[in-house]
Amino acid sequence: MERTVRDEMDMEEDADKLYENGVDDLLKWLVATAEVKASVRGATKRFLDAAAEEARNPKKSSAPIYLEGCYESVYNARWHHVVEVPDGEGMGLEVREGKPEQQWTYKAVGRTLEKDDGALQSGAERLRLMVLTSDKAWPYSWKWKENKSTHDCYVNCEVERVWQIVRNDLTELLSPDPEAYFSPKKRVLIGTPGIGKSVAAGSYLLYQLLHCDAEKLQFVVYSFGGNTTYVFDKTIKTVTKYVGGEASKEFFRDLWDLKMKGYVIYDVTKQGTPPEEFFCLAPDGA
């Protein structure tokens, strides 16, 4: 509190100095002399430089864009599944509508989960693949137009395993037990052949997270490198697109102020580029 008050007083003092030198808007700050700019504190100078640059280049960030019908499309994605069945000459594959009655089962091994093949009865049909179809496609295809026709999300046992790990985290995090303590984990998923980090795992996580209790988990964020971010607001069932890091940063600040709980899926689009600090979950917020 004391530091905040001191910072505000410093800013007011700098503002008075600038006003005395005839600098009362961002345009005049841009053309101010080096001597005038050196008269203010470093934090003030950085703030004004960033604001002036934003004003000069408005295309670098944009207002939120509301994507009509996209929330419903992902939330109501249709299920199909592929099972392995005996066909008289061995085993064949059969495509069926709907969600499978029997999904894969997993067992805890150390700190992770592994598929439990021993739980399957001998001679029983084997689930090979699950498919979710969204009429308006998925965030992956919204971001990259060349994938616009990608309406299907293919879920194998490895993709389902990713969701089971995340679901266990959420079960502990959202536990109603006031004595339970759980620190949210940052999970890192490395794309490997057969798992489909962006196309499959990311889309499937999003679908499942949207179906979690909206009173306990109010939003889901899907961001591609921090530059293009889709916010799924479960309370009002909308999808909002934010372009540019500053727009995303302002949105996250609002979330922290409102103490809302949510989940962030951050898709690293460039090697060696970690998420910005504001994507990290606040200790008392989401």
Image (spheres, rainbow, N blue to C red):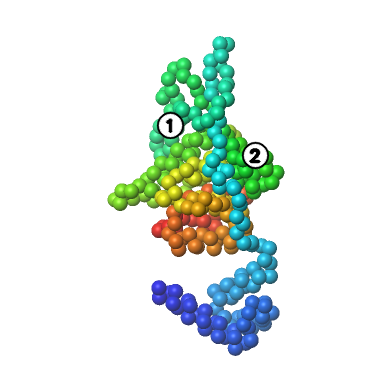
Quarter location, residue 164: top left
Asked whether 72 or 268 is in front, the reply is: 72
Q: Which of marks 1 and 2 is in front?
A: 2
Residue 5 vertical placement versus 158 (above, below): below
Residue 238 vertical placement versus 108 (above, below): below
Asked whether 191 or 71 is in front, the reply is: 71
**Residue at the extreme left:** 179
Q: Could you tell me which quadrant the N terminus lies in? A: bottom left
**Residue at the extreme top:** 88
For the residue marked with disc 1, what is the amino acid?
Tyr
Secondary element under disc 1, as helix, strand or loop, is strand
Asked whether 94 or 188 is in front, the reply is: 94
**What residue do we see at 54% from left, 33% from top?**
79
For the residue marked with disc 2, what is the amino acid?
Thr
The answer to whether residue 206 shows anywhere in this view is yes
Asked whether 165 or 96 is in front, the reply is: 96
Q: Which mark is residue 150?
A: 2
In the picture, measured across the screen, residue 176 lies left or right of residue 143, that is: left
Q: Could you tell me which quadrant the C terminus lies in? A: bottom left
Dot 1 crowding, Cα within 10 Å, few <14, some 14–19, many 20+: some
- Looking at the picture, how far across and down is residue 143, in whole percent? 64, 48
**Residue at the extreme bottom:** 20
Q: Mark 1 points at which residue?
A: 106
**What residue do we see at 30% from left, 51% from top?**
178
- Looking at the picture, how far across and down is residue 111, in whole percent? 41, 39
Total marks in image: 2
Residue 215 vertical placement versus 119 (above, below): below
Q: Which mark is residue 143?
A: none
Secondary element under disc 2, as helix, strand or loop, is loop
